Amino acid sequence: MTSGPAAPGTPSSSAHGPAAGARASRPGPGPHRHPGDGWVDCACGTRHWGLNGAAGLLLARRTPDGAVDAVVLQHRALWSDQGGTWGVPGGALAPEESAALGALRESAEEAGIPGEAVRVLEEVVLDHGTWSYTTVLAEVLHPFEPAATDAESIEVRWVAADDVTDLPLLTAFGEAWPRLRARLESAPTRPTTPGESPCT
């Protein structure tokens, strides 16, 4: 499910249960539904998507010297919140689902990202107490081309890291991007181990 904001915070593996003031509704014609779908009236005064919080995948492709060359971005469907802007694939977490698994699931559903092509590096959490959003930072293990695989995306593609700010970005992602890019650039990377789990 096309999700709300991504912003930096402190690494965490915690997840929030359904929040007070939560209410379910359908935001558009997306085909993937689960019990975590619904709006939360947050203590910050804003309505957020995801009764158990939400997560998105910021997947990086690196140059041979380890620099971040490009990231996968999603051109959000016009019917979605801030439709027509660009952000990371992601959405509401299912009950008892970790942020990393939720982000991998959502990115497979929306962007055709194969889980075996992804190595999770760290999680960056925006925590509002009653609701949280986790940006899962990751790097690609082997080449592939993402694609819009459901109605929640107009387009999904690799975007050169230096060109990200040329796009009309989801507001919160645009604010967070410089810090998220810095985290990706500084995250340790290592050679691929055959058969390793993508969530290592």
Image: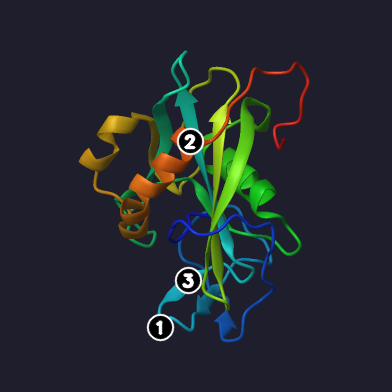
CB under 8 Å between callouts 2 and 3? Answer: no
Q: Residue furthest left?
A: 166
Q: Residue at x 57, y 61 (%)?
A: 54
Of the pair 15 and 22, the residue shown nearer to us? 15
Residue underneath mark 1: 45
Q: Residue at x 56, y 36 (%)?
A: 138
Residues at marks 1 and 3, CA–CA distance in whole angstroms: 10 Å
Looking at the rendered image, the disc whose residue lies closer to the viewer, 1 or 3, is 1
Q: Residue at x 47, y 13 (%)?
A: 64
Residue underneath mark 2: 186
| On-image quarter of the C terminus | top right
x, y percentage for residue 6? 45, 56
119 vs 29: above or below:
above
Amino acid at pointer 1: Gly
The answer to which quarter of the image holds residue 73 is: top left
Residues at marks 2 and 3, CA–CA distance in whole angstroms: 30 Å
The answer to which quarter of the image holds residue 65 is: top left
44 vs 159: above or below:
below
15 vs 61: above or below:
below
Q: Is tag 1's residue or tag 2's residue first in the polypeptide sequence?
A: 1
x, y percentage for residue 46? 41, 78
Looking at the rendered image, the disc whose residue lies closer to the viewer, 2 or 3, is 2
The answer to which quarter of the image holds residue 16 is: bottom right
**In-image side of 133 versus 177 (left or right):** right
Residue underneath mark 3: 48
- Identify the mark at residue 54; answer none if there is no mark: none
x, y percentage for residue 74? 40, 42
